[in-house]
Amino acid sequence: MDNAYFLDTTLLYETEKQDKPKWPIIWVIFVILLIPILYFGFQKISSLKIFENSGEKVRSIIPEEVKNTIMPPSKPTITIAPTVTKKELARKDLKVEVRNGGGVVGAASKGVAFLKNLGYEIKSSGNAASFNYKDLTIKIKNSKKEFLSLLEEDLKTNYTISSSSADLSEDSSSDALVVIGR
């Protein structure tokens, strides 16, 4: 009967041995695998050099090609800008007086036909006080000076402009005076 007693204890001991969990072995394997991962991970992070040792400057980890692009703000912003509408200049709103200042027969008539064809309103035409004009001269009222560049652009296709100004008298019956030279 003594053998039965030892036999039962042996069986109990072997049963307890089999029920023992394998967690300590799993933890050891996990730690062994984790150490190299952490080591190389910290090596990678430290190679970025986000901060200098002195603590004075912060280095950027943003690539240069990204730095040179415009980046949107982190929060959307609403900017209300005044709307500026460019007034479309209508040639028909400018009353032009055309004068022959070079003495060439028909020069004023050709100028009138040219400007009418572009849409300008012709107030009057005729000879200038003198025939001493070599090239084209433009004078426009200061109140209509926004038309000066438009009139210059139109006339320079067919004429050489020697002078242009916004000093035509406000009392003049026309808004612009064009004197055609030789």
Image (spheres, rainbow, N blue to C red):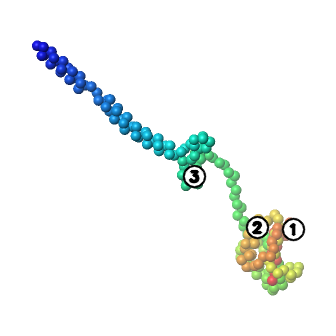
Residue at mark 2: 147
What's the residue at 79%, 70% (across, down)?
95
User: Is residue 168 visible in this depiction of the protein?
Assistant: yes
Q: Residues within 10 Å of mark 2 (few under 14, many from 20)?
A: many
Amino acid type at circle 3 is Lys
- Quadrant in the picture for residue 111: bottom right
Q: Nearer the viewer, residue 125 or 181?
A: 181
Q: Nearer the viewer, residue 29 or 148?
A: 29
CB atoms of marks 3 and 2 within 8 Å = no
What's the residue at 50%, 45% (across, down)?
47
Q: CA distance from mark 3 to mark 2?
A: 45 Å
Residue at mark 1: 169
Q: CA distance from mark 3 to mark 1?
A: 57 Å
Amino acid type at circle 2 is Phe
Quarter of the picture containing the N terminus is: top left
What's the residue at 21%, 21% (across, down)?
13
Question: Tag 2 or tag 3, which sits nearer the N-term?
Answer: 3
Q: Residues within 10 Å of mark 1 (few under 14, many from 20)?
A: some
Above or below residue 106? Residue 15 is above
Residue 75's disc is none
Question: Tag 1 or tag 3, which sits nearer the N-term?
Answer: 3
Q: Position of residue 87 (x, y in %)?
A: 71, 61
Q: Position of residue 146 (x, y in %)?
A: 76, 65
Circle 1: element type? loop
Q: Position of residue 162 (x, y in %)?
A: 80, 76
Circle 3: element type? helix
- Front label number (3 vs 2): 3
- Quadrant in the picture for residue 181: bottom right
